[in-house]
Amino acid sequence: MNPGFTKEDVMNALKLITNPQNQKDIVTSGLVDDVKIDDEGIHVALKISHSTRPLLSSLRKAVHQVIAADINPEINVEITVTDIQPSQAKKPEEQHIPLANVKNIIAVASGKGGVGKSTVTANLAIGLAKLGYSVGLIDADVFGPSMPKMFGLEDYKPEAYKDGDKDMIIPAKKYGVKVLSMGFFIDPENPAIWRGPMASNFLNQIINDGDWGALDYLLFDLPPGTSDIHLTVVQTLRLRGAIIVSTPQQVAIADVVKGINMFRNDKIDVPILGIVENMAWFTPAELPNNKYYIFGKEGNKAIAEKYNIELLEQIPLVQSICENGDNGTPSVLKDDSPQGKYFMDLAKKIADKCEITL
């Protein structure tokens, strides 16, 4: 058989496809395992890791497109996929899997502070609970815990009980969400002056000694930037994915890229479920149909498209969202309000992505 093209021709065509994770072509990136040509057509074998699996649908489409354009539009193309298993060193010990009864563990992160990450996390957690899921939330921002105020739990002091030789910490429960926060254990007027390992040890205690039970979702409100806390979460737990929160400001968007690269690093390999653009525009209460783009316009949309990540939601800067958070009554509680609807829509999108069946 002489099809008029060679394996090398096909590989060169596949090199036209860019891997959005590192901006190299998919052949150089190692996503193409092999190419075979026979009487039935072209067979392309792809190797997909945990972090590149969300890209699989677009990769399949791109392979068909470049072969049709550069090789033969009539030829049959078959694509097979092999999952690359993460190394054992990156997985928790099989004999002790932290949070083994949690179906989906999701990290909520931001490249910088002040973008409303905790507001998004609190509203998302309550939104998921309102959809009927069992939800927990760990306030892992140990140096600036916000959840006690956002949930109206500033006076909550966790109790513990004995389970054999172990002291189990009882989370607070409000609005259908189990919550544990560093803020429950310290004086809110005094800063937590801890070195990285101390903060990580405290977080490990909340993870392992918290009485979480069986959950559909456990959200982690991570500190801004990258730190020992991030490494503790990604190296200790089997994350379903990460959500990155940003504002349209260019300085915030630059840090979004750092967050994307951190989670997509080969040693971390956590899928990014999407980006939430907070403070996307300003809408005054007296002019609810007006939009003022005071921090810039759709900067995160461009980043999402460049890195093939979904822009999950654009949430406006509205005075009531801030006030509701300060009052311990997050906006999603009023899902008939425009502000509540944004967060309920976000919760529904996350539930769809995680494909949980109650």
Image (tube, rainbow, N blue to C red):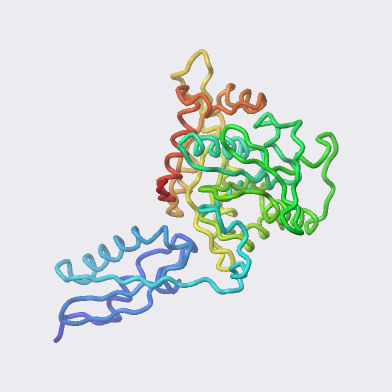
User: In front: 21, or 187?
Assistant: 187
Residue 51 percent across, percent down from the top left = 48, 62
Please report the residue visible at 48 percent of the width from the left and 15 percent of the height from the top.
287
Quadrant that contains the N terminus = bottom left
Residue 110 percent across, percent down from the top left = 61, 46
Q: Is residue 225 left or right of residue 20?
A: right
Query: Which image quarter: residue 151?
Result: top right
Q: Is residue 253 left or right of residue 113?
A: left
Query: Which image quarter: residue 330?
Result: top right
User: In front: 254, or 343?
Assistant: 343
Residue 234 percent across, percent down from the top left = 61, 60
Q: Is residue 286 left or right of residue 164?
A: left
Q: Is residue 267 left or right of residue 335?
A: right
Please report the residue visible at 59 percent of the width from the left and 59 percent of the height from the top.
262
Residue 220 percent across, percent down from the top left = 61, 48
Residue at the extreme front of the image, as rendered: 164
Residue 111 vs 232, above or below: the answer is above
The number of discs equals 0
User: In front: 321, or 208?
Assistant: 208
Residue 130 vs 210, above or below: the answer is above
Residue at the extreme top of the image, as rendered: 286
